Image (spheres, helix red, strand yellow):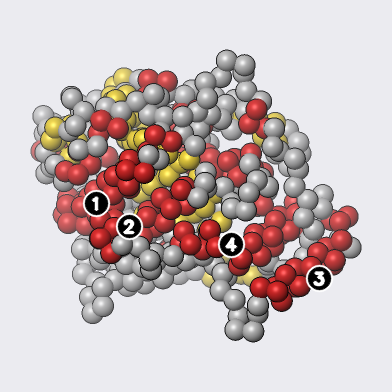
Amino acid sequence: MLTLLGSPRRCCDGRTRRETLTAGALSLLGGGFDLPNLFAAEARKPADARPGKAKNVILLYLLGGAATQDMWDLKPDAPAEIRGEFRPVDTSAPGVRICEHLPLTAKWMHRAAVVRSVNHKAGCHNCLPSYAGFEQPMPDQHPRDTDPPSMGAVCEYLRAGRGDLPDYLYLPCWLGWGQVFRRAGPYAGFLGRRYDPLTSECSPHADPGEKPVPGKPSVVRGMPVLPNTAFDADLTAARLSSRRGLVGQLDDRLRAMEAADAPAGYGRLQRRAFDLLTSSRLRGAFDLSKEDPRRLDRYGRTLFGHSTLIARKLVEEGVRFVNVTWDLFWDRVQVDYDAWDTHTNNFAILKGNKLPHFDQTFTALLEDLAASGLLDETLIVVMSEMGRTPRVNGNAGRDHWTHCYSVVLAGGGVRGGTVYGASDAQAAYVKDLPVSTTDICATIYKALGIDPDLTVPDRTGRPHPVAPGGRPIEEVLG
């Protein structure tokens, strides 16, 4: 095991970031490879189950807690300390109004649904609710092997072994990498690490010569890359294949260990590593060097823009679940405070940095998918792990709030131009039709044609529903 120590700086909720990160060794000599036959799992549905309209999901995850009352659920009639500085504007969906600083998105709301009554009580910055629908408070935010699996991990589990590409990719880096603090949520948990996402790496940076200015986040540049996908100078494909054969012979001597989760997981990771080195499809999806410069400009030449463009290329290749996180990098590189945790200067940061870049990238994705005919079968989800306080604080910011916030869904399986649920006059609490994070997960599963009551086994073989107690929001499903 390799132990890395993080920075001593603290998260905004007071927890120290000098957390221990443990990385399991990926040994070329370790463990065998034995996957259960899961091909029939998705067929275990009621006879009258409606086929899912979406074949793929792109999840745009805005880490930190986006101020959705300044994006999707504005309150223009509230007192100034509640309503903030932005105005709502009409959109392409009659009766649906969103923030004035999302002008491009406003033209696409006829293809989107806004759920304005999401809430949970599992604690601030807890990502397990949004990724897995698990709403129990946890002692800390570290991932555990006993956690419930994320939606992407369930997709990987259900289609394990099909094709030469993984079904769950996570961009641009593991969740919390920029804080040297691995956050729970996106992983496979009790399903086993073999179903964790294939996660890219990145080297984020600000523009050359730019000096960080407190309260004014930099535009984060960079490109996600696949880990370990370049041949050594003397390693040909033939030699790589020969090495793989040798590893296979050694693994034959270790089959007795296959029942243990970790060796089996390592075997899957070994195979994935070899496949990545030779998969032109996957490497091609990450190669933006041949893209039309005008398309790169449309998405935005940012880490988030590049990651989202790659996500679109991955679903074109048939990858089922792709996550793109707008992460925070303040402990890795000098880009000041990124992400969406706007305790100070909320409106200046949103107006000058977050909203225009999100607006540009999100709508470029919608435009490309629509032009290629893939929007009807690709579900796009925009969410955070929480929302922000209704009242503006003394630093012109909004603080943590889990009692009411919004999630947006667009594209495949969504009834466009829909608003579901309502917050009260101050966007503080749910007024009508409360929605749990488990309901959101159930809705995503239903859009994909996966029964939310489908069970998956934990390490003891006990069955667990993938969305325990969750109810799909039928009103937003097309």
Q: Position of residue 386 (x, y in %)?
A: 37, 41
- Residue 128: mark in rendering: none
- Please say if 319 is above or below 50: below
Q: Secondary structure at mark 4?
A: loop
| Camera-side mark, 1 or 4 | 4
CA neighbours of label 3 inside 10 A, class few (<14), some (14 to 19), many (20+): few
Q: Nearer the viewer, mark 3 or mark 1?
A: 3
Nearer-the-camera pick, 166 or 462: 166
**Residue matched to label 4:** 279
Amino acid marked by disc 3: Leu
Could you tell which of marks 4 and 2 lies nearer the N-terminus?
Answer: 4
- Label 1 element class: helix
Q: Mark 1 is on which residue type?
A: Gln
**Residue farthest bottom in this picture:** 234
Q: Measuring 84% from the left and 67% from the top, which residue is drawn there? A: 250
Instruction: Characterize the local packing of mark 2: few (<14), some (14-19) or many (20 or more) Cα atoms within 10 angstroms.
Output: many
Task: Judge whether 343 appears above or below 115 on screen.
Answer: below
Question: Which residue was labeled with disc 3?
Answer: 246
For this view, does 102 lie left or right of residue 334? left
For the residues labelled 2 and 3, say whether their Cβ atoms are less than 8 Å apart.
no
Q: Is there CB contact under 8 Å for labels 2 and 1?
A: yes
Residue beneath disc 1: 360
In which quarter of the view is residue 291 placed? Answer: bottom left
x and y percentages locating residue 448 in the rendered image: 50, 32
Disc 4 or disc 3, which is closer to the eye? 4
**Image-based side of 276 in relation to 258, left or right:** left
Q: Residue at x 20, y 38 (%)?
A: 107
